[in-house]
Amino acid sequence: MNPEAIKDLVIKMADDELILGHRNSEWTGLGPVMEEDIAFSSMAQDKIGHAWALYQVLHEQLNGTDPDRFAFLRKENEYRCSQFVEMPNGSYDFSLMRHFLFDHAETVRYESLAASAFEPLKTLALKIRGELKYHTLHANAWVLQLSQAGEESHARMQQALNEAIGLALGIFEPSEHWEDELISGQIYPGEVALRQRWEERILPVLTQAGLSLPDLGRVEPIYGGRKGYHTVHLLPLLNEMSEVYKLDTEASW
Amino acid sequence: MSNDSLDPRVNRLKLGNAGEAVRVEEGENWNSYEVFHQEKRGAHHEHVGCVHAPNRELALIFAKEQFARRKKCVNLWVVRSADILAFDVEDEDMFANNAEKNYRDASGFKVMEKINKYKQSKK
């Protein structure tokens, strides 16, 4: 197996986790109620932890650089996160809907990696299974709660879903060069299969919530992030995230 | 009923005409739920605190990060605080003389003697 192919997969997964982890952490101290503030912040930390574990795999198994340097010192167009995760938080409805759509996508991806031929990913997938179970439980409960909490609440959740859906499909942007190789090498089942499994997960919850999922055949997926094309929102996030690290890149923490 | 407060536990009641019925919509007020934590399988669930939540599912979800993210935990219970029945504080005197009634203590049963005797016989 070409290590470049596996690197491509690991980097995009890690960057999604890092950037969304950072975004979600922006809610810390501002959450709607204390209990939710703690839960959401804690899950944001989990995401940073997943990113760190993946950067560690890159560093130790795939000849990569030090995780901190890799996370904080790349240029904007070297990040491979989807544009979905870099979008600003907006209101809590959008943040929750993104959390719901992303964490289900994350879950089907890691579930598939439990059968990966690449051992480090398999190990990580088994390790974080319980965390992801909690994340999707939390997301489902909120989507159901808010969609059934009156007319305005329902309308806002539907609006958030409509705004998020094209961006969410961008998570499944296929790898430019390595998709076939990764599939035939049984590293992972490929973006098309993952998207299919994801749709099967989110549809029952959205249906129960009384939200209508737009016809996904007609929604234009927002691609580009996996090739390094980002929105204007990523750079300010990166600057803020790496501000302290860049004060002294040689400091030991 | 409008709620001007950002805190969902507090309703700012708009008092209209006296005598006019005030209707509280379902879900308008969150409940508090008592949280019970189990450290290992088979152990008792112990009361650790409470959370506010709109329903018991979310109460359990909140409780997990609130009370089980640091120390060891294998299970949690949540119970709506309003479902707990307790004695009034003024009725504390019912318990006052318990300490004197040592004839109720299990120490009256000389079990250890029997156990020790049995152990001896097995040696």
Image: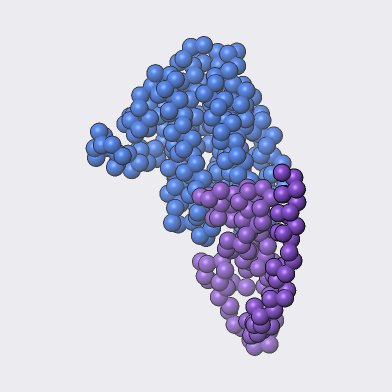
Is residue A117 visible in the rendered image? The answer is yes
Is residue A77 visible in the rendered image? The answer is no
Image coordinates of residue A134 in percent, x first then y, are: 60, 44
Image coordinates of residue B27 in percent, x first then y, are: 66, 64
The part of the image, by quadrant, that contains residue A111 is: top right
Image coordinates of residue A173 in percent, x first then y, are: 53, 26
Q: Residue at the location (64% across, 33% down)?
A: A198
Q: Residue at the location (51% across, 16% down)?
A: A178
Image coordinates of residue B39 in percent, x first then y, are: 60, 51
Name chain B's colour.
purple
Which chain gets the blue colouring?
A
Query: Relative to A89, is A120 above or below?
Result: above
Instruction: Name the quadrant of the C terminus of chain A.
Output: top left
The part of the image, by quadrant, that contains residue A56 is: top left
Foreground residue among B116 and A14: B116
The part of the image, by quadrant, that contains residue B85 is: bottom right
Foreground residue among A227 and A212: A227
Report the side of A3 relative to A112 (left or right): left
